[in-house]
Image (tube, coloured by chain):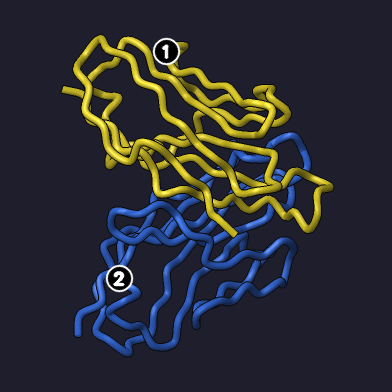
């Protein structure tokens, strides 16, 4: 069974640009979440999508946005990039409550490492 | 608010030593608890989990017991190997309450095992 796939794995942007990251969840998983990981702040929750709707949102500015498609694939977008947006962006998928043997665990991809110059 | 606190790292051990990484949580109810591991350059992998009090999660020689009375979920391994060198994250979630996908993570503990 294929795991969570994130593309691209690495990218370099300059301040003011925008970036789109893509995530394909594990087959059958309907929830997709995004996290930002930095050395200083650790793992921070960005948002979660289920049935193409944002269900939860973390404390990030509106420059960070996402969406989910009908096949559960998800994208996140960061506009007007700042140096502080340099991070590893992790996507995770999961079953939803009541779906199979769901107990809340997330399954993570390998991440997209964004460097902003 | 809800939170997870892990012991400060880095933790440096010799091969075959006993490992304990402390984790405590604060929550208004009874969350599901997890340990994740992150190897260099990779994403997070679920190591083990426990969903109710007194549950013991175990995997690859690692164990952790959900202790409601002490709100703890300490990670242990009897004999570590060099290949266990990684960053370990403790996390909690209230599954089914609308918080699906929103894990609360500890700050991570780096483990270095020397041969």
The N terminus of chain B lies in quadrant? top right
Image quadrant assignment for residue A44: top left
Image quadrant assignment for residue A103: bottom right
The residue singled out by tag 1 in the image is A63
Mark number displayed over residue B66: none
The C terminus of chain B lies in quadrant? bottom left
Front residue of A18 and B18: A18
At which x and y percent is residue A117? 15, 22
Image check: B72 left or right of A43?
A: right
Chain of the residue that carries numbered disc 2 in the rendered image? B
Front residue of A49 and A28: A28
Q: Is residue A4 above or below residue A58?
A: below
Element under label 2? loop
Chain letter, colour yellow in render: A
At which x and y percent is residue A57? 58, 24
The residue singled out by tag 2 in the image is B85
At which x and y percent is residue B58? 59, 76
Count neighbours of disc 1 (C-alpha within 10 A) and say few if under 14, some if 14 to 19, many if 20 or more.
few
In percent of the image, x 54 and y 40: which residue is there?
A: A24
At which x and y percent is residue B53? 73, 66
Q: Is residue A102 above or below residue A34?
A: below
Chain letter, colour blue in render: B
Front residue of A15 and B93: A15
Q: CA distance from mark 2 to mark 1?
A: 36 Å
């Amino acid at each position: 069974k294929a795991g969570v796939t994130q593309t691209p794995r690495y990218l370099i942007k300059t301040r003011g640009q925008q970036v789109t990251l893509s995530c394909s969840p594990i087959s059958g998983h309907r929830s997709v979440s995004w996290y930002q990981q930095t050395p200083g702040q650790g793992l921070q929750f960005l948002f979660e999508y289920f049935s193409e709707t944002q269900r939860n949102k973390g404390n990030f500015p509106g420059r960070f946005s996402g969406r989910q498609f009908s096949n559960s694939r998800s994208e996140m977008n960061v506009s007007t990039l700042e140096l502080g947006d340099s991070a590893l962006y992790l996507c995770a998928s999961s079953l939803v409550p009541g779906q199979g043997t769901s107990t809340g665990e997330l399954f993570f991809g390998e991440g997209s490492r964004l460097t902003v110059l | 608010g809800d939170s997870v606190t892990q012991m400060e790292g880095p933790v440096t051990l010799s091969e075959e030593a006993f490992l304990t990484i402390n984790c405590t949580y604060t929550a208004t109810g009874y969350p599901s608890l997890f340990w994740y591991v992150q190897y260099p350059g990779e994403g997070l992998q679920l190591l083990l989990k426990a969903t109710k009090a007194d549950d013991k999660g175990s995997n690859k020689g690692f164990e952790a017991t959900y202790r409601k009375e002490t709100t703890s979920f300490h990670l242990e391994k009897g004999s570590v190997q060099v290949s266990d060198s990684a960053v370990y994250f403790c996390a909690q979630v209230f599954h089914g309450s609308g918080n699906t996908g929103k894990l609360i993570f500890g700050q991570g503990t780096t483990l270095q095992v020397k041969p």
